[in-house]
Amino acid sequence: MAKLLPRLEYYHRPRTIEGAKKLLRQGKRTTMILGGGVSLGMIPRKQITDVIATEKLNLDYFIAGEELIQLGAGLSLGSAARQLEPHDDGAARLIMEAISRTATTPLRNLMTIGGVLAGVGPWSDLPVALLALHTTLVIDGDQKIELERFLLEGPAKVLSRSGLVTEVQVQRTGEISGSFMKFGRNTTDLAMASAAVSRRHSPGYDAEIRVAVGGLVARPKRLADVEEFFLSERQGEVDRSSLLDLVSKTVTPRPDPRAEKEYRLNLVTQLIADCWEDLLEEGQR
Ligand SMILES: Cc1cc2nc3c(=O)[nH]c(=O)nc-3n(C[C@H](O)[C@H](O)[C@H](O)COP(=O)(O)OP(=O)(O)OC[C@H]3O[C@@H](n4cnc5c(N)ncnc54)[C@H](O)[C@@H]3O)c2cc1C
């Protein structure tokens, strides 16, 4: 810890959300909320003097109800995956797929749901899958924000108004099928591109399709035009060339030293199309 946070003076372990919020309000610009602490291996935190740890807040719970999966912000990704395993529905499977492609087992056992969402970036895997589902974040225990809005506004802006991510809620009603795919230089590399596609049938409603991508832009992004494209195609093989045109019009990739923009646009297009074909195959089984 001394090397990762060289100026650390106070390590607070509040036992209530109210207590954590009070500390945050009193805090300085050099105060940091700590989930699993894995981001410290990526982003230098040399100025941090105060840490507010989430470990005593009792946020490491998992609740799978009929309509919602509730993941406490302090739950590790590893623990979430283990508790999701017996739940054989599309939402649970999509979340598990994204977690299984995140980093390594030891890191997954440290990374928390709250930390992965508050620390979201181009590298994020789970938020891509959650964006392809209906996901809501609970902030400070009592305020709700759609994940899509949270990502559009940016965690720094949203959390500066309030404070802590306390829970993630994922809807599981209707018949959901989903697929997540990621490409990196090796199995534990950060995503050069990733994609998640979900389809939901609810009795009495048209099918709903959601498409999200990661790796190319600052934060995971939902592609409404691609969703429309799939709604009109519905069945059969994807016209990958038309899909590439569409994706290229909607996504402007940030630079990545690992590959050119054109290559990554092509890559994400193939991942989206593969996810879609995966869904169609699942529907035929
Ligand atoms: C070696 C390595 C490999 C990685 N590989 C992957 C990968 O394959 N896929 C992937 O998606 N990511 C990967 N990551 C990134 C990792 O998911 C993020 O760093 C994530 O933020 C870590 O979660 P954490 O719980 O450890 O967060 P922390 O490091 O504790 O915190 C991250 C940020 O979130 C804030 N925060 C934490 N909890 C809360 C909360 N409850 N409310 C509000 N703010 C909070 C912190 O203040 C901090 O700003 C990797 C990181 C490393 C170092």
Image (spheres, rainbow, N blue to C red):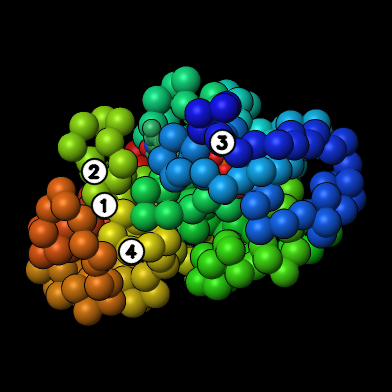
Q: Compare marks 1 and 3 and give the one earlier in the sequence.
A: 3
Q: Position of residue 194 (x, y in %)?
A: 31, 50
Q: Position of residue 258 (x, y in %)?
A: 15, 48
Mark 1 and mark 4 lie on one chain; the one further toward the N terminus is 1
Contact, mark 2 vs mark 1 (Cβ under 8 Å): yes
Packing grade of label 1 (10 A; few <14, some 14-19, many >=20) is many
| C-alpha separation, residue under disc 2 versus residue under disc 4 | 15 Å
Q: Which residue is mark 4?
A: 217
Give the Cα distance between marks 4 and 3. Answer: 28 Å
Q: Are marks 2 and 4 in contact (CB under 8 Å)?
A: no
Amino acid on which the number 1 mark rests in the picture: Ala
The residue carrying mark 1 is: 193
How far is mark 2 from mark 1, CA to CA?
A: 6 Å
Circle 3 crowding by C-alpha within 10 Å: few under 14, some 14–19, many from 20: some
Q: Where is mark 2, residue-wise? A: 183
Marks 1/4: CA distance? 9 Å
